[in-house]
Amino acid sequence: MDQTPQTAPAAATTPAKPRSELAETLRFLVKLAVIVLILRSFLFAPYSIPSESMLPRLLIGDYLFVTKWNYGYSRWSLPAGVPLIPGRILGRDPARGDVVVFRSPGPDDHDVIKRVIGLPGDTIQVRHGQVILNGKAIPKQRIGDFILPLTANFDAQKCGASFQDVDAAGVPICRYPRFRETLPNGKSYEVLDQAEIPQADDTGLYTVPAGDVFLMGDNRDDSADSRFPAPIGMGYIPMERIEGKAVVTFFSTNGNASWINPVSWFTAARWQRIGEGF
C-alpha cells in the first residue's frame, strides 16, 4: 500500500528582536534636536534681556522671540557661529528703527540687541543728545517720565541716586527722563536720556561703510554701541553678524521669583508685558 508522503515540518518562526527602549529614546532625542536646530537657525529663536541698555522698551528679565529670515542667513544664524554658510545668503538690509539681535565683534563675541539707526552711506552725529541723521536732526520730544519699580533684577545699584524715588504707595522706583524719537521713515520709539554725558551726547561725524549698520541702544547714556569703537563699544556692525529681528515679548519676570516658592513664579511675572511687539 502506497504511503502518503509526510509534509516536512514548517520552519520555526524566528521571533522579532525586541527594539531597545534606550535606542528608541536616543533616536527620538536626535530627531528632536535636529528639529530644534532647524527652527532656531532659520525660523525663530528665543532671546533674553540681560542689561538695561534698551530701556524703556526692554527690561532685564524680558524674553523675546526673534525671527531669523528677515535679513538673510550667515554663519551667525547657526549655533556658536559654526562656519557652514559663506558670507550672507538671501541678504536684505534692515529698516531704520528695527530692533535686531546680532553677534558682537571681538574674541568674547556674544549676542547683543540694539536698534538700527544708520544704513550704509548714512552720516550720523549726536549733538547735545539729539541724533543728526544725514544732516537733519531726528525729532526728539519730551514725554512723561519712565517709571520702573526697583526689583531683584533692577535694584538701586542700577538706578542712579538722583533718579530714585517712591510712588504714591511708597514703593521704591526709578524715574528717568523719557523722550520720543521719530525717524524719517515714520518709525517712532521711546528713548531715555539721563544726563549730559559728552562722550555719548556729543560725538564726531560717522559715515556708515558699505555692508555695515550703525546701532544704538534706546537707553542712550547706558549703552555700549556704534558710537564707541571696540572694546568700549561695538563700532559699525557688519550685516552678516545680524541674526534676526525682535518681534514679540513672550515672557517677563522682575527677578523676585524663588525656586523653592512656586507661588513666586507667578507673582514675579510681568504679565502685562507678554505679547508686546516692536
Image (spheres, grey):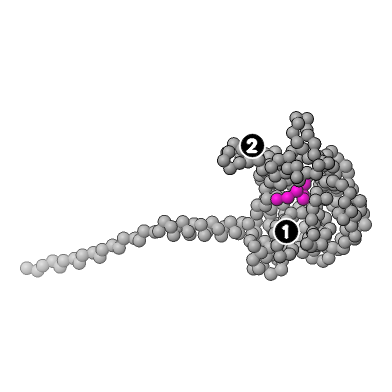
At 77% across and 37% down in the image, what residue appears?
A: 173
Q: Quadrant of residue 87?
A: bottom right
Report the side of 145 relative to 110 (left or right).
right
User: Residue 89, image x and y in percent?
Assistant: 70, 66
Q: CA distance from mark 1 to mark 2?
A: 32 Å
Mark 1 / mark 2, whichever is N-terminal: 1
User: What residue is shown with label 1?
Assistant: 102
Rendered position, 259 above or below 199 = above
Q: Which mark is residue 88?
A: none
User: Residue 274, image x and y in percent?
Assistant: 68, 42
User: Residue 247, image x and y in percent?
Assistant: 71, 50
Q: Which mark is residue 267?
A: 2
At 71% across and 47% down in the image, what residue appears?
A: 60
Q: Nearer the viewer, mark 1 or mark 2?
A: 2
Report the side of 201 relative to 170 (left or right).
right
Secondary element at tag 1: strand
Dot 2 amino acid type:
Thr
Q: Give 170 or 81, whichever is nearer the viewer.
A: 170
User: Residue 178, image x and y in percent?
Assistant: 84, 43
Q: Quadrant of residue 71?
A: bottom right
| Residue 271 can be seen, yes or no | yes
At 79% across and 59% down in the image, what residue appears?
A: 233
At 68% across and 46% down in the image, what residue appears?
A: 61
For the residues bearing labels 1 and 2, Cβ distance under 8 angstroms? no
Q: Is residue 171 magenta?
A: no
Outermost residue to the top: 169
Rendered position, 173 above or below 135 = above
**Magenta residues?**
50-55
Outermost residue to the left: 1
